[in-house]
Image (cartoon, grey):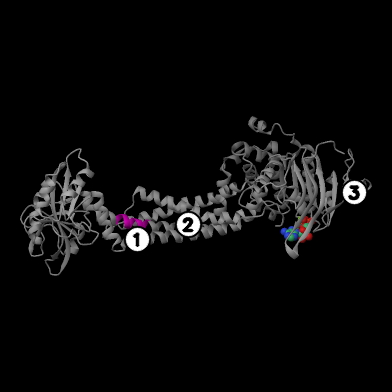
Amino acid sequence: MSSKQPVLVAENVVKELGKGAGKVMALKGVSLSLVPGELTLLMGPSGSGKTTLLSILGCILTPTSGEIRIGGTATAGLEPEALAELRRKYIGFIFQSYNLFPTLNALENVRIALDVLGQKGYPAAARAEEVLREVGLGHRLQNYPSNLSGGEQQRVAVARAIAASPAVVLADEPTAALDSENGHAVMALLGRIAKEQNRCVLAVTHDPRTLGYADRVIHIEDGKIVREERRPEGINSPEITDLTKKRRKANV
Amino acid sequence: MTPFFQSIACGRPATSEFADPSYTSNARGHAALGISQHMILTLAFRNLFHDRIRLAVTLVGILFSIVLVAVQLGLYLGSSRMITGMIERSTGDLWITAYGAKSFEEGGILLTPRERHQALVTPGVKSVIPLVVSFAEWRKPAGGSTRVVVVGSDAEDGGLVPWGLVEGTWEDIKAPEAISADQTYLKDLGIEGMGSTAQIATGRVRVRALTRGIRSFTQSPFVFTPLQRARNLLNVEGEKSTFYLVQLEPGASVEEVKSQLVRKLEGAEVLTKQEFSDRSLTAWLFRTGAGIALIGGALLGTLVGTVIVAQTLYSSTKDHLNEFATLRALGSSAGYIHKVILAQAGLSAVVGYALGMSIALLVLWLSRNSPLPLVMTPGLALSLFALTVFMCAISALSAIVKVTKIDPAVVFSR
Ligand SMILES: Nc1ncnc2c1ncn2[C@@H]1O[C@H](COP(=O)(O)OP(=O)(O)O)[C@@H](O)[C@H]1O
Ligand SMILES: [Mg+2]
């Protein structure tokens, strides 16, 4: 187990979605914590509540009950603007469909994320360029999303998410729209971000190819965490599945 | 890598292994940084130019409004200037008129010399200049007739003299039968120009001087002639006058002299230059409904423009809603998103204004020789810009209301 302090903690989170007859209990009491330096995968069948959980962890949705703490701040009762501030300070998002700005080029897509945080001018532009080089897009700075491959677009999205060095990176099915090679590249990138930049990275996925990159896998079904696996420290084998099966945690 | 580049990278974990092969070999350096440094403006600009057709509709909407409002207000200003031109050109501080005088052209019943003498002995009054002004029938030399406004005034008095003389002098107008006419109206008057003769009421007149640019809102041309000849032509008995123009001693208070005159002169009204000017404006622009039509047209133009711009801005915002939701998910404040929308509105305003103003100025130029030339002043130009910005800001409201309702959660469900 990592001895590091968790940055993001969820305790007994319940979320109801919809109204009246269409009301769904999307999360039924979920607790988890994210510590720096780990890539955690959140796996589960479609409709199990993965996206809902990610939205709540990222302060986009508020839980019906339960508690979220980010960097020691409890989010309960915060106004939308205060939640936006928490997102600015702590969270970087990566989306399945990239959500890049089609009218901005790669560099500008990263710069606008910095601009939102109040980082402007030359330093921000230089930082955007730097982080695009980090994800291997130094030669695509001026390309618009329409002129980038899916893998490249997702790498721009990764650059955008990590440009401001957030403590937490949340990714919703980051590889779902990518072919195998690009899927592996993006997962490797997320793994390196977790370890080398010491961030909490949580990726929602139901793509078994991604397992090899995980330090930890959380399985969710029907709004509840059913299982959590952890790769033993020091073992770098990409074949985590067998190992983790033996090391199921009971404390979830 | 420049030293600066290193300095901003410090304090962060080393990431050199992430670098792609082009990282060190890339000699382009920071060429990319030459682009706009303002992301809100950049995004607003791109969103705006992304859909050219919508942009065209927006600009046409603004342009239409500006031209319409500029024309209406330009006509209004032009009319106002024509209506008050004579009063503005006069050198008097106060006007004595018959009670209920409606305008410069409609002075009503005549004032007697008694009122002039009473005014003259009022402290603070330097001089009292009589003017005779009246509509009269002008018989064209070749037959037919039209109406003119005869202005009888002696230049020596310095009260009201024809301006913009292009041929002849005031001395020439003193000759028997002499009058001045304005070039603009020669055709209406049915005359050739200098030396032409015609008849006003029952008296023969001859054009001895020509002015340029003394236009008349009533479209009845102004004809200048000395005071006494005007009285003769118009059959004014005795020393009666339409108006007395009061000039004050230096340092005398307009209000004080006015109240003294009001007390002395029963049956006459004493108005400051501004009051008489306003009264003439009211008479011609508002009593006739012309002013209401012009101002109504301007309001309509504003309304139509606002609706068009609001519509296009709203639909643009709707199209880019996912991006705004993404911005929100990235942690942007609502204010940041509002700024993007306002920047879009502002950019539309600036471009639309520039185009609209160009066309308005062209219309203005084309109208320069018409009976009612448009007028543009720096003040009007500025007001039009303020109006455009206001219009676009109002238009932005609906888009802002729309964007305020977005749920950032939609970013996951695209
Ligand atoms: N806005 C919503 N209103 C009502 N039900 C919703 C809404 N969003 C999601 N749900 C429901 O909540 C459950 C969890 O959804 P979601 O978190 O998107 O699952 P996953 O990402 O694991 O596929 C599903 O049953 C889904 O139908
Ligand atoms: Mg999902």
Q: Which residue is mark 2?
A: B59
Q: Amino acid at mark 3?
A: Thr
Q: Nearer the viewer, residue B394 or A181?
A: B394
Tell me if residue B386 can be seen.
Answer: yes
Left or right, A85 with reference to B369: right
Q: Is residue A89 above or below residue B130?
A: above
Task: Name which quarter of the figure residue B109 lies in.
Answer: bottom left
Q: Considering the whole magenta stretch, tell me its main secondary structure.
A: helix
Using the image, determine if residue B180 lies above or below residue B128: below
Residue at 7% across, 58% down: B177
Report the span colored magenta.
Answer: B70-78
Please report whichever mark, 2 or 1, sits nearer to the chain's N-terminal start. Answer: 2
Identify the element where label 1 is drawn: helix
Mark 3 — residue? A241
Residue A107 location (% of width, % of height): 64, 44
Determine the residue located farthest toward the right in the rendered image.
A246
